Amino acid sequence: MTSDPSCLFCKIVAGVLPSDEVLRDDHVVAFRDLHPVAPTHILVVPTTHVAHLSEFAGSADPEACARLLAAAAELGTRFGAHGYRVVTNEGPDAGQSVHHLHLHVLAGRPMSWPPG
Ligand code: DGP
């Protein structure tokens, strides 16, 4: 498992920084977002340091990818009684601020489309 000691989410995965954790296994950790934009706002991150989704292009570990998506689905099902949204941001245009891949699982309110 690779880890970047300077990465915020690697520190959360390692337990060096606290988080409101809702799920953990060998492949993923999920915890509540510090600045929620919905009543349920959970981040699902791979336990291995992957900065961006595009790093998975062509060379992804299929088991890790599948587990990341399955964990988001499990959390959406658990917390989104009326539906949920799964989002990932990559690069400046999308507003990515933490460079450790994460899926946002949003639920608990109606959401508009297209996103801003
Ligand atoms: P993004 O903009 O897509 O890179 O999302 C990063 C998210 O990470 C943002 O919604 C706020 C959240 N966040 C930033 N720092 C922390 C932290 O220390 N703890 C937690 N739980 N969330 C954080």
Image: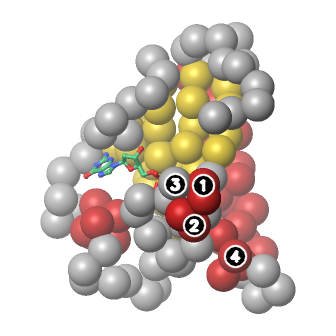
Crowding near the residue tagged with mark 3, few <14, some 14–19, many ≥20 C-alpha atoms within 10 Å: few
Q: Residue furthest right?
A: 58
Q: Is 83 situated left or right of 25 in this image?
A: right
In the rendered view, would you say 47 is above or below 87? Answer: below
Quadrant where the C terminus is found in the figure = top right
- Measure how far apart labels 2 and 3 are at the Cα level: 6 Å
Pointer 2: what residue?
91
Q: Secondary structure at mark 1?
A: helix
Q: Which residue is mark 1?
A: 94
Q: Nearer the viewer, residue 76 or 55?
A: 55
In percent of width and height, residue 11 lies at: 25, 68
Asked which secondary structure carries label 3, the reply is loop
Judging by the rendered image, the residue that carries numbered circle 3 is: 95
Q: Is residue 92 above or below residue 40?
A: below
Q: Position of residue 98 (x, y in %)?
A: 40, 62
Ligand 1 closer than 8 Å to label 1 CB:
yes
Few, some or many residues within 10 Å of mark 2 (<14, 14–19, 20+) = few
Name the kind of residue labelled 2 in the image.
Gly
Looking at the image, do the residues carrying marks 1 and 2 touch, with CB atoms under 8 Å apart?
yes
What residue is drawn where x is 58% and y is 73%?
52
Disc 4 residue type (three-letter): Ser
